[in-house]
Image (spheres, grey):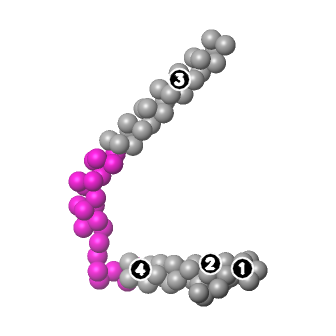
Amino acid sequence: MNLLRKIGDRKKKQTKIVFGLIACLLLIFTFTDLQISETLYNPKSTFGWFFESFGEVIIALIGCFSTVGMIRTSKGKWSFY
């Protein structure tokens, strides 16, 4: 029984450390994200332009296929009212 308590205490300590690390990283990147984005952004890059356009198409396709999937699996249990 004592061994289980030690394991539980260790997991709680690890969880606190992980959440503390995530909180620190969130705080750091809150102030540095804009600088990183400005460094990487290049509006004249063909590579960036292509993947920006490609990413927008993928999201639209995912939305369309998800909507069709929901309609097909609903078995007529929905209405427009």
Q: Mark 2 sits on what residue?
A: 66
Q: Which residues are magenta?
A: 25-47
Amino acid type of the residue that numbered disc 3 sits on in the rendered structure: Arg
Return the mark for residue 10.
3
Q: Specify the farthest residue to the front.
A: 81
Place of residue 2 in the rendered image (x, y in percent of width and height, measured from the top left): 62, 11
Q: CA distance from mark 2 to mark 3?
A: 42 Å
SS at badge 4: helix
Could you say which quadrant of the image residue 49 lies in?
A: bottom left
Amino acid type of the residue that numbered disc 2 sits on in the rendered structure: Ser
Q: CA distance from mark 4 to mark 3?
A: 45 Å
Q: Is residue 13 above or below residue 54?
A: above
Q: Specify the farthest residue to the bottom.
A: 80
Q: Mark 1 sits on what residue?
A: 77
Q: Is residue 35 above or below residue 46?
A: above
Label located before the other in sequence (2 or 1)? 2
SS at badge 1: loop
The front one of 61 and 53 is 61
Asked whether the residues under the numbered discs 2 and 1 touch, taking CB atoms below 8 Å apart as contact, a structural biologist would say: no
Label located before the other in sequence (1 or 4)? 4
Place of residue 28 in the rendered image (x, y in percent of width and height, measured from the top left): 28, 47
